[in-house]
Image (cartoon, helix red, strand yellow):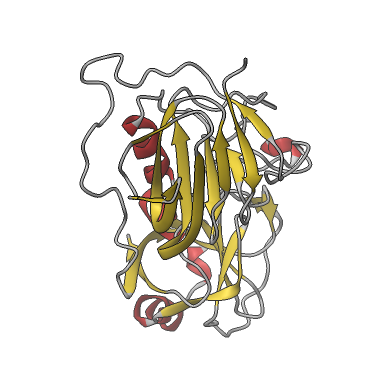
Amino acid sequence: MIDSITIIHPGLYSSIQDAGRYGYAHLGIPESGVMDRKAWRIANALVNNPEHTAVIEFTIMGPTIQFECERHFVITGGDIKAYINGIAVTTGKVYIAKKGDMLKCLHFISGCRGYLAISGGLLTIPVLGSQSMYSPVTETSTLKKGDRIQIGASNYGTFKGVGIKNLKTVQQSNKEHIQKIEAHMGPEFNVLGERHINFLKETVFSVSKLWNRMAIQLEQKLFDQIPSIVTGPVVPGIVQLTPSGNIILLMRDCQTTGGYPRILQLSETSMDVLAQKKQGDQLSLLLID
């Protein structure tokens, strides 16, 4: 019998993600990979998986999963209501599931993305060096009801000192009302005048209804006649400014080129914070020279 888990209900936007795929931007293929890398790394450390092991990422509403074998597991990321056979599961705490046990991940109390790491890791077939799901590179971009995923041999508890066995909290401060997002000057930062820069520094921004793994658009606009640029390369973390004043923060599934001025570049820490933001959440920009 192959060790595996079965997806009973996929939840929303649930997918398998790892560090992402690199070296294919010239073909128009995004990096993809986990949105909240801090939560991902902590999850794998907690169950003694290698650092780059693939996990299940889910958004807003988590999946229901049946274990077909005994395995340790942990959930990190946002603070989510989850249950194993009806018993509450705490974010950041390692549990053991027996064969036939049912894990139900419901809605988030704070944050919006969660990560399920299982000891032994998920053994899906890599495409272009990554297990990250992204259509059309992979057959589908999300998990489906009835999917059966093979998992590897567990190393949990095998090596003394490997991983983190006790951690009171692995959540980010998702409950903070307004979080500061660190940003550095982008390639076209010089198109901004003093008024624009002050606007970026002083405004409390809200996440619009346009937010996903590709990009987050902010509600507030920076109105001005700033022209587009000759199409150039973009990477996750680039902040674009459209001619109509829209401020767009590119995320892990972003395109590889763009024609809007690249006014800022977000730090990796900021990307992790943004991964837990949903429509209506507020943030401010901390510009770093």
Task: Give me the residue at 75% from left, 42% from top.
Answer: 140
- Residue 258: % across, % down: 68, 56
**Left or right: where 106 falls relative to 161:** right
For the residue pair 59 and 80, the one nearer the viewer reads as: 80
Residue 181: quarter of image: bottom left
- Residue 28: % across, % down: 74, 42
For the residue pair 249 and 258, the one nearer the viewer reads as: 249
- Residue 17: % across, % down: 57, 38
Task: Give me the residue at 63% from left, 49% from top.
Answer: 253
**Left or right: where 218 falls relative to 38:** right
Residue 242, compared with residue 222, is above or below; it is: above
Residue 11: quarter of image: bottom right
**Left or right: where 235 falls relative to 114:** right
Task: Give me the residue at 56% from left, 76% from top.
Answer: 208
For the residue pair 245 and 196, the one nearer the viewer reads as: 245
Q: Judge whether residue 135 can be spotted in this image.
A: yes
In the rendered image, the quadrant that contains the C terminus is bottom left
**Left or right: where 211 falls relative to 173:** right
- Residue 274: % across, % down: 45, 60
Residue 142, compared with residue 174, is above or below; it is: above
Task: Give me the residue at 33% from left, 74% from top.
Answer: 178
